[in-house]
Structure formats: structure tokens, C-alpha cells
Amino acid sequence: MAHNNKPDLKLWLPTTKKEMDIRGWDYVDVIIFSGDAYVDHPSFGAAVIGRTLEAEGLRVAIVPQPNWRDDLRDFKKLGKPRLFFGVSAGAMDSMVNHYTANKRLRSDDAYTPDGKAGMRPDYPTIVYSNILKELYPDTPIVIGGIEASMRRLAHYDYWQDSFRKSILIDSKADILVYGMGEKPIKAIAKELADGKNISELKDIPQTAVLTSVDSTKNDDKNITLHSYEVCLKDKRKDAENFKIIDEESNRITDITLWQSYKNCAVKVNPPFEPMSEEEIDASFDLPYTRLPHPKYSGKSLSAYEMIKFSVNLHRGCFGGCAFCAIAAHQGKHITSRSERSVLEEVKQLTLMSDFKGYLSDLGGPSANMYKMGGKNKDMCKRCKRPSCLHPKMCKNLKCDHSHLINLYKKVDAIKGIKKSFIGSGIRYDMLIHRYDDENMNIAAKQYTEEVISKHVSGRLKVAPEHTSDSVLNIMRKPSFALFGEFRKIFDKTNIKYGLNQQIIPYFISSHPGCSLVDMAELAVITKGLDFKLEQVQDFTPTPMTLSTEIFYTGINPYTGEEVYTAKRKEDKLAQREFFFWYKPENRNNIRNTLKRIGREDLANKLLGNKKRK
């Protein structure tokens, strides 16, 4: 990593007592504990929250990856903050960070210097908070980030194969921030700075707090979910809960959710309205160095290297894929930055000493949703649909790709930019769909050509996820036939521009609803399209997604129907093997599996007829 000989430590938020002394600070207002290394960049949550609070005039320090195994000196070294401790597990749920879909311990960690494993505990949100509560019982603790956000209510934990309470209870924290945290964290800080006690902050939007069981309500502004104990005994009741949580978190609503436990209740306040353009610009325009803290000098941080020369255009995703946590965390309403904010960030990148002229990504959760949303905003506020694209595209959705085309052209015109790539996934169903508005059809066609001809770094990643329409329906994904259409356009455009580019499809095995026959047919179909699959994954259940709920309960909460899911290790492995039918070591297993289920016809299509001796 490029650093000057002696970097100015005052450019980063302090991480040690010495760095506080350099600033002449004898106290701090907020100390943030994070499971990730400290990278001062808008893609890293601790930096965003730290800079947001700093902009409010507060003194903020960050303790990245504290040692929780020793004498706890990392938890004591900065003393007690004036207002509160902030705790986040980091940019990922710690259990996804630590374990594979097969529950094997991963050997590296992208958010730790040199990828070193074991620098954070399982469930850091709980571990760090418990330590802080023990050391400083009177100092408020605010938890946030993806781990806290997705575990705010009772949830299934795949790694422990158990149904767990809200993380608020296990962490002993005072308040939980869910979703993107800038607005709630400012509100919390202001109330505490004004002299309020943390126990009084029961109604801040986009937070969850513990209350007494007898405070739960059920009326037109409040929904009381089935209690933790009831759900523990009856999975169908948990599925009923999930449908309510899923629908309510997808609309801009003033509904409060309550869930009781034996001797307390969790109250989840309604969210803030989505950020305005001015608000999201303000967050991205904060004075980030865009660099890892100098303490990591000489070490590599792969999560940083991946996004170092990329620019995030928007937050949110209205795709609503059943297995994805983005909408549950960032919301389905798109919040886009202004062109000014994006172009200024690109100019900043061109000044970095090791920038060679190539932007790795101009994207977002989905690359092509910038400045899109509902035509009638009032309809959007009332709408409970988790996906604006499935089962079919919402008539109220305005998918105008012209904003992106204009932005790409402006970025490419900036001095020092040789090429900008689109590394985020593209929703090709939005490019193929025929809109009532002819201008939107023209823009979608132009966008498709623009991306394929100018913004692909040799390989375009897209995510059909499966070939079976019944599995895709559970996933809330479009029919595989659309992938075939898009591939034809991709190939034609390559020929037109004399390019030799590949399309790389992503697929998932063992998703709820997927059988061995579905996987065998996937293998046969993709073989017929000349693919030897490499970008594949085994379904990993993560808290608060529809797919995880079906995996755990065996019930689709929206239909009440029972759904088959491969759960045993050997069943999951048998499904995964079909991706790699072309590997000699898998052939016998695959043939035997298909023989066992009476589908030798598929074995012959996939592996050819077995030669008779």
C-alpha cells in the first residue's frame, strides 16, 4: 500500500492513546469497537459512522479488532467515552466470515491484515458488548452493522443449528441500530449529548430496544409478533412472524413491531424515511483518507484492495432475491448519489499515487438501479411487496437507464480515466423487459450495448442462480429463459465490436425447493450452452432472509406450503457435485446418484452412455 514515509496520523480517527495525545484530546465522546481492520473509506461501516459523528462535532475513536482473549487491555486503553460505546461485528456477519456453507472454518479473513484468521471471535457483537458491559456497566452500548441488523429479532442460526433470541438480549446492549446507520446514530448521539439517559431513548426510528413484556401493543400502529417461546415450539408460528417482518421492513411505514421473551420484550421502531440525495452525498463527501490506517503499513487487506478503485453509486435494491440480505439491511428503496458527488470521488481516485487509470467498478448492490424507483411515491410507501421485479415487474417502477449512460460517459471523460468497468452484478431482466414507455426501452437497449462494448473487463458476471423455474420462483428470480435471451444479445454485441468477452453465470446449489433432479437438469442445460461452471456456491442460510426461513421451518411463509430442502452434508455435497460434472473424480458419484433416483437418461446426457464391455 502506498503511504508517505511519515503519514499524518491526524488524518485518521485515533485508534490509540498516543493518537489521541497527538490531537491534544484528554477524552473522547464515542469509542467504536469493530471486528474489521480500520480502513477510512465509505465502504467500511465503522469509518462511515465515525466520520458521521465527527461531522456532528464529536470526538470519535475506533478500536479495530480488539484482543478479547488476553487481559482486555484493548477494551481499557482509551478509557470511558463521554457518550457511548459503538459496537459492530464488521462488514459481514461474523459466522459467514468464519465458516463455509459446509460449516468448515475458513483459513483467511478478507477484512484482516494479510488475511490472518482468528482476529475476531464468533459473534463479536455479543462478545465485545459483554466485555464492555462488565468493565463499564454505566456506559451506554449501541450495537449496529449487518450482524446486529439481521439478528434484531428471534432468528435461526445455521452455524449452531438453533433458534436464537434477539441479539439485543444476548449482547446486553442498550440500543440496536438496524439498516444504514447514519440517521439513527446522529439521533442517539444528540439525545445523549442533550443529557438524556439511554433508558429514555425508546422511540428513535430505525432502532430496537428492550422493554417490559406488558408494554407490548397490538393496534393499527403496532404489531405484536408470536413470542420467542411460542416460535421455539412451533415453526409455523415463526413462519407467520417472518411474513409480517418481511413485509413491514419493505414499506415506508410507521408500524412498530414487538416480540416478547420470558421476562422482556424487543421493540423494533419503524425506519427513517430513505435518505435524500443531499443526505447520501453528505455521507460520501466526508473527509475519508480512503486508505487503511498507517498501522497496517506493509500489509495487504484484500477487502480493501477489492474496492480500492471502485465507486458506489447508490444504496438499496428492489430485486428482493429470497436469499439476499441487502434489501433487509439497506432497504428496497434506492437512494442515489448526485452526479457531482460521484464525479468528485472519481477525481479523488485519479490523484492516488498507485492509480493506473482503471476503475474496477461503478456500481451498487445491483449495478443498474441508479436513480430508479416508483413513479408514484405514495404507492411505494404503502406497498408491501418485497420485490419490485418478481413475480412480475411493478407497473409503478420507473427503470430509466439513461441516468447511468450519462454518468458513465462523464466518468470516462475525466482526465486520468482510461476505462471504467462494471464489476457489480447486472439485472439483465430489467434490460430485456418491454416497458410501456418507449424511451425506457431505447435507454435499456443503449445501456446494454454501452456496458458490453465499453465496460466489461473481459468477463461479465451475471446471476441466473438456477435453471429450474420452480426453484427460481422460490428465489424470487426471473425465468432462466431470460438468461438465454441476454446471452444472445451479449454474443451479438461482441461480434459487432470485434470483442472476445465471456459471460460468467453464477449458480446456487441446495437452495430450498431444489432437488437432485433440478441440479442434474441444471448441469445438462449448462453443458448444452458450453459452460463449465466455476462461479458457484452452496446455499448458506443467513439470518432474516426468506430462503433461510424456508430452510429452517420447511414452510414458505407466503404460501404456507411445505418445501423440500437439502440439509444433510451428504445431500448438499451430492447437489454441489453436479456443478462439476466435467471433473473425472465426480463422474462415478453422479452416475450412481442418478441411477439411484431412476434418472439414467440424465446421466447419459451429461456423461454419455457407459461403454459396454
Image (cartoon, rainbow, N blue to C red):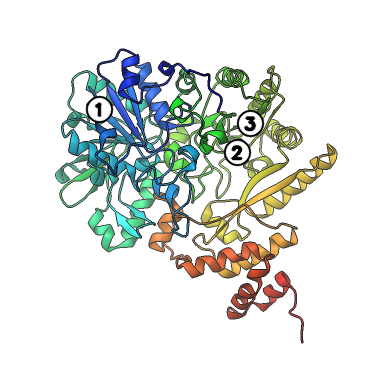
Viewer-side label of 3, 1: 1
Q: Is residue 417 left or right of residue 203?
A: right
Q: Measuring 80% from the left and 43% from the top, which residue is drawn there?
A: 500
Ranked by sequence position, the earlier of labels 2 and 1 is: 1
Q: Is residue 60 above or below residue 465?
A: above
Q: Is residue 239 left or right of residue 262?
A: right
Determine whether the residue tagged by mark 1 lies in a helix, strand or loop: strand
Does residue 86 appear left or right of residue 117 in this picture?
left
Question: Residue 212: which disc?
Answer: none
Residue located beneath label 2 in the image: 424
* Disc 3 residue crowd, few under 14, some 14–19, many 20+, Cα 10 Å: many
Asked if the residue at tag 1 contacts the one at tag 2, i.e. Cβ–Cβ closer than 8 Å, the answer is no
- Few, some or many residues within 10 Å of mark 2 (<14, 14–19, 20+): many
Q: Position of residue 132 (x, y in %)?
A: 23, 36
Residue underneath mark 3:
400
Residue 12: x %, y % from top left: 42, 21
Between marks 3 and 1, how big is the CA–CA gap?
Answer: 43 Å
